[in-house]
Image: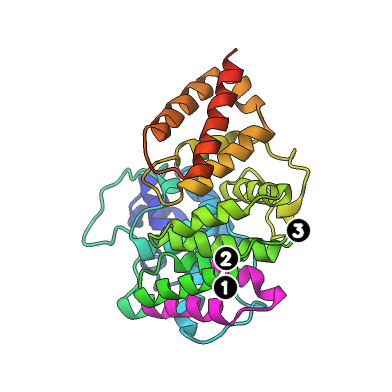
């Protein structure tokens, strides 16, 4: 992340070292990981962030570097612990509810794919030498990290371990090993087959995590079941609140999941969430049932999102027509599609 920020400011390692009045080996150590940036004093870290932005890096540089340090802590904890248990009192996965930006940074060395939210960091200087294009974990480090996630998911069963467990289960969807996919199916059998009780956030989120992780792993069948079980209004509100937090419409950081059952959702507009969902109604994606259900609930709760936005209605119409011409929707999905199409027709009058 530091290398991306430096390059987006048009700086070489030597030039940044000169500006910071530091040795170039210090910059090289930070960028290679030999010298963890998290070991820098808070004051020096903040000065580095602000200096990079003033030198031409995006204004979000400080935020992205802080998120990268947090992602590093999650990865380092897992690699160090391996299959050993780490208490939620000291585990970074239990410190706060993660948004998609941090989660994608954690997955960066797993997927070898630059997170979408970093696209504004456009390099203005050429890469020199065989420098890696993304963070990397060795084969043994990767296995230790994934084994650690599985240990957490298997052993964290108490109420005060729910956040730690839920976030580990989601990340396990990107594991890909047959044994882990089998474990996720067993987790669905345990947590997802029954309908979550109204108001029981733990049951709702356990079922959601298992079905979403399986969808990430390529098995989207159980996501249909989860959406079919999510019938209570409080569960639908919780799902909306989670999505709003996930993409950053809810700005306040959360240390547990109870905020999802806040029935007063006026603190966020839904504009960013609508745009986010419209880009993810792909008939080929295994997440389609949850994305479509969430969009249906969002428009039902906030009809002004399309009533007052002709351009958005046109985009939504195009997306819905594409879905209607596919054969990927079940009965529930077709009903939600029809409801959205009706909402668009009403708004066009």
> Which element is circle 3 on?
loop
The residue pinned by badge 3 equals 199
The residue under the point 47% across, 85% down is 83
- Give the residue at the far top of this rendering: 349
* Mark 1 vs mark 3: in front: 1
Count numbered badges in the picture: 3
Sequence order check: which comes first, mark 3 or mark 2?
2
Whether 106 is drawn above or below 83: the answer is above
Q: Is residue 106 visible?
A: yes
x, y percentage for residue 128?
23, 56
**Residue found 45% across the figure and 40% down from its top:** 281
Q: Nearer the viewer, residue 277 or 345?
A: 345
Taking depth in this image into account, of 56 and 171 the one nearest to the observer is 171
257 is higher (above) or lower (below) than 8:
below
Q: Nearer the viewer, mark 3 or mark 2?
A: 2
Q: Which residue is mark 2?
A: 193
Report the residue that reaches farthest toward the left: 129
Q: Position of residue 216 (x, y in %)?
A: 42, 59
Extent of the magenta region = 143-167
Could you tell whether 44 is left or right of 159 in the image?
left
Residue at the spot of label 1: 190
Instruction: Say if residue 69 shows up in the picture.
Output: no
Left or right: residue 237 compared with residue 91: right
Query: Would you say the residues marked 2 and 1 are in contact, meaning their CB atoms lie under 8 Å apart?
Result: yes
């Amino acid at each position: 992340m530091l290398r991306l920020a430096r390059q987006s400011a048009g700086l070489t390692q030597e030039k940044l070292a000169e500006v910071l009045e530091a040795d170039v080996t210090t910059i090289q150590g930070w960028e290679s990981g030999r010298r963890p940036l998290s070991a820098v004093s808070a004051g020096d870290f903040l000065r580095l962030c602000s200096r990079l932005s003033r030198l031409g890096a995006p204004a979000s540089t400080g935020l992205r570097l802080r998120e990268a340090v947090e992602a590093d802590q999650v990865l380092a904890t897992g690699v160090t612990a391996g299959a050993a248990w780490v208490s939620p009192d000291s585990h970074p996965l239990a410190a706060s509810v993660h948004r998609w930006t941090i989660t994608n940074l954690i997955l960066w060395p797993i997927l070898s794919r630059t997170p979408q939210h970093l696209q504004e960091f456009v390099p203005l200087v050429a890469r020199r030498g065989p420098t890696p294009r993304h963070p990397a974990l060795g084969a043994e480090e990767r296995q230790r990290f994934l084994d650690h996630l599985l240990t957490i998911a298997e052993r964290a069963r108490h109420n005060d371990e729910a956040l730690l467990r839920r976030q580990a289960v989601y990340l396990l969807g990107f594991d890909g090993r047959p044994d882990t996919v089998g474990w996720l199916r067993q987790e669905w059998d345990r947590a997802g087959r029954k309908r979550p009780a109204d108001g029981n956030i733990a049951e709702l989120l356990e079922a959601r995590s298992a079905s979403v992780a399986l969808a990430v792993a390529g098995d989207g069948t159980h996501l249909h079941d989860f959406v079919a079980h999510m019938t209570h209004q409080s569960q639908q509100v919780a799902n909306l609140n989670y999505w709003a937090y996930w993409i950053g419409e809810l700005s306040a950081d959360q240390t547990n999941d109870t905020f999802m059952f806040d029935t007063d959702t006026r603190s966020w507009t839904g504009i960013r969430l609508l745009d986010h969902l419209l880009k993810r109604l792909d008939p080929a994606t295994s997440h389609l049932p949850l994305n479509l259900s969430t969009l249906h609930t969002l428009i039902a709760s906030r009809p002004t999102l399309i009533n007052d936005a002709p351009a958005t209605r046109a985009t939504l119409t195009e997306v819905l027509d594409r879905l209607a011409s596919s054969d990927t929707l079940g009965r529930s999905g077709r009903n939600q599609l029809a409801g959205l199409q009706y909402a668009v027709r009403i708004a066009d009058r």
